[in-house]
Amino acid sequence: MNELLTRRPDRPLPPGTHERLRAELLSAIESEPARSPRRVLAPALAAASVLAVVAGLAIGVRALQDDARPAAAGDPVKPTIRALTPAETQTLRGQCLAEANRITSKSLPHPFTDYKVTKAFEFTDVKDPRVVTTWLIGSGIQRYPSVPKGVPDQSHPGYWLCSRTAGGVISESSIRFSPGARLSGSPMMRIARNAGVYTKSIARITVQAKGEPVTDALLIDGFWFAPTLGRTGWGPYDSGDPGFNDFVVRGYDANGTLLTTDHGIDPTAAPITCERVMVTLPNGDLSATPKTPIRPECREYRWPS
C-alpha cells in the first residue's frame, strides 16, 4: 500500500520502542484513527514496524473545504515537461540513491537499489535554482529487514519518488508509496510540499505557496507534481518539512468544482476517529470497513483508481 511512502528514513530505536510501536499498530488496526500525512508518510523510523503494517490500511487525510472560494481562475495551465534521456536518468538515479543512503540509518542501508525507474522527467522553462523541476519514479518491493518480534514480514510492492531542484540539489530522496492505499477523508493527499497522490474524482490540482500565485500541478499515473520551492538539506533524523504548511493544495473535479483543500497540518487539531467494523476474510485475515452511515471525513478512496 502507501504507505506508503515514507518520508524520512529511520534511526535506531530506543529499548522498548519496538514493543510500543507494535501495540500502537494493533490498536490502529482495531480503531484506525486518522493520522496526519506527515506522520503516516514519513519516517522509516517506523519502517520496520509501522510501515510494514500500513500497507492496506486507510491513511487519514485532514482535508478541509475552502469555503466556496475558488483559488484558481480560468482554464488549467498544464505544466510542460520533457522526459529525461537514458543518460540523464541514470545520473539522476545515482544522485537519488546516494542521498537516500546518506540520510538512512545503518539498519536500512542502500535503500531503493533494486527499484527500477519507470519515469524520469523535468519541468521546462524554470529558472529559479531553488524550484524542484525534476522527478524520478521507481517501482520495486518494499522490504523490512529488521521486523520487530511478533510483527509478521509484510513486504509489498511500492513506488519510490525522488526530486531535484533546477540548481541540481536533491530535494526529496526517499518518498515511498504503495498501491492499495486507502485515502480516508479526501480524494487527494500530499506526500511532500509539492507532490502527492490523487484518485479518479480529481481532474485538476493547484498548489499555492504563501503569498504566491496559484501553480497548476502535473497529474500523471495517480501522482501529482508541482514546480515549487523544494525542501533541501535533509539531515539523517529529520522527520518533517518546516515549510510544509506554507503551501495550500486544492483539488477540483472535471467541472471545475472545488472538492477538497489541504491547508497543511494543524498540530493542535484533535485526531479524526472513524469507527470501523472488523470482519474476517475467507483466508482468515482481518479487514476493517467504516460503519454506516459514513461520515464525510471517514469516506475512503482507493489508490490508485
Image: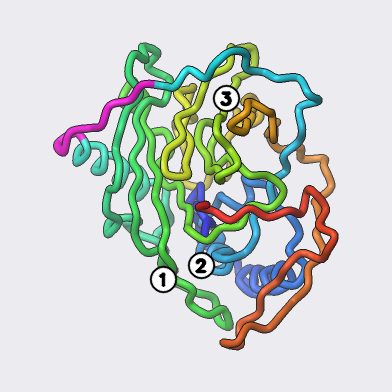
- Tell me if mark 1 has few (under 14), some (14-19) or many (20+) residues whose alpha carbon lies within 10 angstroms of its own: few
Q: Is residue 161 left or right of residue 2?
A: left
Q: Would residue 295 be seen by someone viewing this image from the given angle? A: yes
Q: Residue furthest front?
A: 255
Tell me residue 186's x, y (percent).
68, 44
First along the sequence among labels 3 and 1: 1
Tell me residue 192's x, y (percent).
53, 37
| Magenta-tinted stretch | 80-88
First along the sequence among labels 3 and 2: 2
Q: Dot 3: what SS?
A: strand
First along the sequence among labels 2 and 1: 2
Q: Which residue has dot 2 on it?
A: 48
Near-viewer residue (148 or 62):
62
Q: Which residue has dot 1 on it?
A: 145
Residue pictured at 33% horizontal, 55% vertical: 112
Q: Which residue has dot 3 on it?
A: 207
Tell me residue 85's x, y (percent).
17, 33
* C-beta proximity under 8 Å, tags 2 and 1: yes
Residue pictured at 14% horizontal, 36% vertical: 87
- Tell me if mark 2 has few (under 14), some (14-19) or many (20+) residues whose alpha carbon lies within 10 angstroms of its own: many
- Whether the magenta-drawn stretch holds residue 101 is answered as no
Mark nearer the viewer, 3 or 2: 3
